[in-house]
Amino acid sequence: MASDYSQEKLESLLSDPSFRDWILFNKDAEKWEFWTLEDKNRAKIVDEARLILQSLRKHNVKYTDGDIENALRHTWGKIKLNPNRGSRKSISKKILYAAAAVTILFSFLLWGYNSSDLFNLNLTDQVALKNEEGLIEHYNNSNKALLITLSDGSSVLLQPKSKLSYPKIFPSNERNVFLSGEAFFEVSKDPKKLFSVYANEITTKVYGTSFRVVAYKEQPNVEVLVRTGKVTVSSPKIKDNKIELVLLPNQAARYTKKESLLEKIEDITQNGVLSSKPSSIEKLSFEFNDITVGQIFKTLEQAYLVEIEYPKEVLENCFLTTSLNDLTLTEKLKIICESIGNNSTYSITGNYIRIFSKGCN
Amino acid sequence: MLKIESKENSDSGLWLEIKSGREDAFDLLFKKYYVELVMYCRNTIHVNQEFAEDCVQDVFADLWKYRNNISSNIIVRSYLFTSVRNRIYKNKKKFKLSLSFKRDDNFHFDSFFQNEFLGLSDEDLLRREKLNKIINELSERQREIIYLCYINNLTISQASVILKINYQSAKNLIFRTLTVIRGKISAFILILLFL
């Protein structure tokens, strides 16, 4: 039947890039139109080929240059998540779960801990796993805030039902963490290493300061509230160009997901502006004037929701005058120990802090 | 033929620059192929937009991260399509996505009216609408080879590598697919004649 021959012709037309360029992009129109008219039988085949090609090519109305730029930026974001891996590793999740459990148990044993009063680690309350990118994923399953100390000394108070992903040790040039939910950040100062919090569509960048990020998946808004220092907030999804807001203490940024709108809130001390109330740490003052060490530790316990074990008898009559505002928890502990003197030291494991001291001068 | 060769040259030039660490070359390659790759996934394998975008971005991210482990002699176009396809199928298995896309005929309709198809006769519009449906009814494989060879500028030989079939199977597949399409078109035209 003629159809066999015509199908051959059809195939050879369709496989010809020059023909496709004519149908789809109108290149060399004159030459091809002439060719089509040369032979009566060609018109039918050309018509068929045109129908097929034009139907196959769905138009990409949705992709503007801006969309492509955003996708490119997103891709660089993925690259920076884990830049220097020479080879891929895939570890089955079961092995990771087992390893995590063993690690937690092991550090338990290392402490030589036998009484269950002060330190009650419920393994289901916090789940910390290594994900495929090599980041630790810390999920707070309990009903109170959870303290996470990062490798640079920064502290993060992670609220319930929230998750923080971070590298065990920060690389030399940057500090990136990923938040889903809500947390209060105290970032240790390092002008050489930018600290970035990626939460849903908002990125918060600082060199050292304290601020709160509220970014729950189900909520319509993402918010960043600054307590101390200077914070830059940007959102990559905004279509025209990259908008960056610079926030000072007591200022906030609110990102409305639906409208992709990023706005600045000038004064968060006004009521009713924000969706959630500040946690106790944001309300407390860390100015201590001739206060007992025990009292100072109590304040820290309240602010960071930690347990602090310290030699009470030895430190009974120690009074300190010091200002610990705008410092991370580890920085605060360091200064307290230095102020007590006598080679006093501390150690942190999750929410549990232990102070070693022989008394003050 | 000349046109294809110069395209390959610019791709291989870009790739060499990417291998030597040039981020601007990476950006150029990304902009050149991103939409084409995403639309390929949407149109042939019928995954949703977010999933397709995610997979393509992951492929590019890996291309940069592991550039030192990849040969300088790759055919970039082939390599990208192969990687994207592999990533889509791997991730589909992981997350068990259901193919609900088939019900979304609106997708075809929208692209239908938003381009130069306006101004065509009713009969022509009907034909194109019908062809959209025919393409939708093809198997994934059939759609893939048609797209790879006729829209994404790959040769049959390259398409056979990407689809992991041998050259003759690829040729047969194209032939059968065109037969199916033409058969359905003429059945449709017959119906039109009797209306």
Image: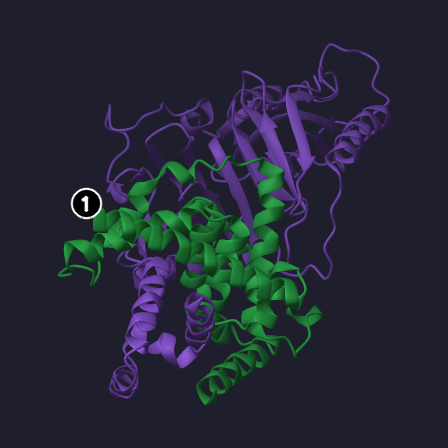
**Residue that badge 1 annotates:** B195
Q: Is residue A343 visible?
A: yes
Which of A241 and A95 lies nearest the eye of the viewer?
A95
For chain A, what colour was chosen? Answer: purple
What colour-coding does the image apply?
by chain
Q: Is residue B53 visible?
A: no
Which of A161 and A69 lies nearest the eye of the viewer?
A69
Quadrant including the N terminus of chain A: bottom left
Q: Position of A165 compared to A258: left or right?
A: right
Chain the render paints green: B
Q: Quadrant of residue A259?
A: top left
Residue drawn at x 40%, y 58% as measured from the top left: B182
Give residue A155's position: percent from left, percent from top: 57, 37
Q: Position of A352 compared to B183: left or right?
A: right
Q: Is residue A333 above or below residue B117?
A: above
Which of A334 and B148 lies nearest the eye of the viewer?
B148
Taking the view exactly as shown, the residue that stands out farthest to the front is A1
